[in-house]
Image: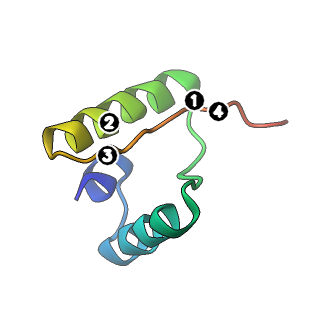
Amino acid sequence: TMLMSVFAMRQDDATSLMLKIHNEGVCFVGPYSYDIAMSKARKATDMARRSGFPLLVTVERADT
């Protein structure tokens, strides 16, 4: 799946996260540097669109 390939998740973690996104509409995937986060967001969004899913991946700055 996209979550497994882009975010290196195990299948059970990807399934749990997918259900959280479905039920709550939003979730936290992980902390990344800005450049890596943007790259992963673009890749995930592109993969979702090619598969016909309206997934929106955004990058937010963490409060430090």
Displayed quadrant of residue 1: bottom left
In the rendered structure, the answer to whether residue 14 lies left or right of residue 48 reads: right
Q: Identify residue for label 3.
A: 6
Which residue lies at the image location 49% right of the left edge and 32% below the top edge?
37
* Mark sitting earlier along the chain (4/3): 3
Rounded to the nearest angstrom, the CA distance separating label 4 from label 3 is 17 Å
Rounded to the nearest angstrom, the CA distance separating label 2 from label 4 is 15 Å
- Residue 11: give its label: none
Disc 3 residue type?
Val
Farthest residue to the right: give it. Answer: 64
Callouts 1 and 3 close, C-beta under 8 Å? no
* Mark sitting earlier along the chain (2/3): 3
- Residue 38 at x, y = what percent? 46, 25
Displayed quadrant of residue 8: bottom left
How many C-alpha atoms fall within 10 Å of the one at disc 2: few (<14), some, or many (≥20)?
Answer: some
In the rendered structure, the answer to whether residue 52 lies left or right of residue 45 reads: left
Q: Identify residue for label 1.
A: 33
Q: Identify residue for label 4.
A: 60
Q: Identify residue for label 2.
A: 45
Indicate the secondary structure of the residue bearing disc 4. loop
The C terminus appears in which quarter of the rendering? top right
Disc 4 residue type?
Glu
